[in-house]
């Protein structure tokens, strides 16, 4: 399973755009990239998933360069409620097994 | 859609007792369910993969005789912590996998907080 590397923590302010980059140099050809959000004492919540280029949904965008060795989660106009841990994972295709890295603690300030 | 529930949401037990945690996929059938453990301020650690109708596959370092997993139906998997001790106190999270097109989507339950006194 591909290992991921993310910043341990990030700080932002309400209304700003936040970009969290994840590196996954050993990503396999059939691996997808998935981002989850986790609040304290809750299970992770799916944010977005992609394979290549750009994916956008109602809460976030995911940018994946052509070599797929990294990806960037973009959260537009964050609010205080976006303070959470964000995990980048690769894999989970034919087998479904996911390995969580350390995650990024995002703190949004007023 | 794609809701996963866990029961109980929290449990406190005495050392030496066994505790059962249920994981249910409420609106889809999950051929595969996963069990994770998360200690405070740490990431989720995969404990085992549970496939309906077959024995669970445990990750290295996880005692299969201590953490009994049963996946009796396509919507229910149970984790039993046998002879629990204080060091087993943790946040246990399950997830259920649903195949969508060519990709498996994984949905997580809300977690169960286990405290062993």
Image (tube, coloured by chain):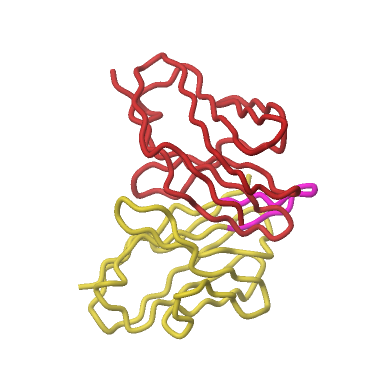
Chain colours: A red, B yellow
Magenta span dominant secondary structure: strand
The image quarter in which residue A39 lies: top left
The image quarter in which residue A68 lies: top right
In which quadrant will I find the N terminus of chain B? top right
Give x and y (percent) for residue A49.
Answer: 64, 38
The image quarter in which residue A58 lies: top right
Q: In the figure, A58 relative to B90: above or below?
A: above
User: Which residue is depicted at the point 45% across and 60% down?
Assistant: B45
User: Which residue is depicted at the point 55% across and 26% down?
Assistant: A59
Give x and y (percent) for residue B54.
Answer: 66, 79
Left or right side of B51 for A42: left
User: Which residue is depicted at the point 33% across and 84% down?
Assistant: B83
Left or right side of B62 for B18: left
**Residue B42, magenta (yes or no):** no
Give x and y (percent) for residue A87.
Answer: 48, 43
User: Which residue is depicted at the point 63% across and 42% down?
Assistant: A33
């Amino acid at each position: 399973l591909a290992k991921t590397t993310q910043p341990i923590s990030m700080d932002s302010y309400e209304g700003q755009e936040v970009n969290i980059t994840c590196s996954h140099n050993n990503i396999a050809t059939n691996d997808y990239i998935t981002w989850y959000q986790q609040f304290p004492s809750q299970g992770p919540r799916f944010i977005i998933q992609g394979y290549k280029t750009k994916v956008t949904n109602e809460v976030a965008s995911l940018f994946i360069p052509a070599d797929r060795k990294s990806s960037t989660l973009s959260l537009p106009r964050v609010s205080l409620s976006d303070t959470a841990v964000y995990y980048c994972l690769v894999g989970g295709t034919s087998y479904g097994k996911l390995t969580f890295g350390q995650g990024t603690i995002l703190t949004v300030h007023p | 859609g794609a809701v996963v529930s866990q029961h109980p949401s929290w449990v406190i037990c005495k050392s030496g007792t066994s505790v059962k945690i249920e994981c249910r996929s409420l609106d889809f059938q999950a051929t595969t369910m996963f069990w994770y453990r998360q200690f405070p301020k740490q990431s989720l650690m995969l404990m085992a993969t549970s496939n309906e109708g077959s024995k669970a596959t445990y990750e290295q370092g996880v005692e299969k005789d201590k953490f009994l997993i049963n996946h009796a139906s396509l919507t229910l998997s149970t984790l039993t912590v046998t002879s629990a001790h204080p060091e087993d106190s943790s946040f246990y999270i399950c997830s259920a996998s649903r195949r969508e097109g060519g990709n498996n989507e994984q949905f997580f339950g809300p977690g169960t907080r286990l405290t062993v006194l």
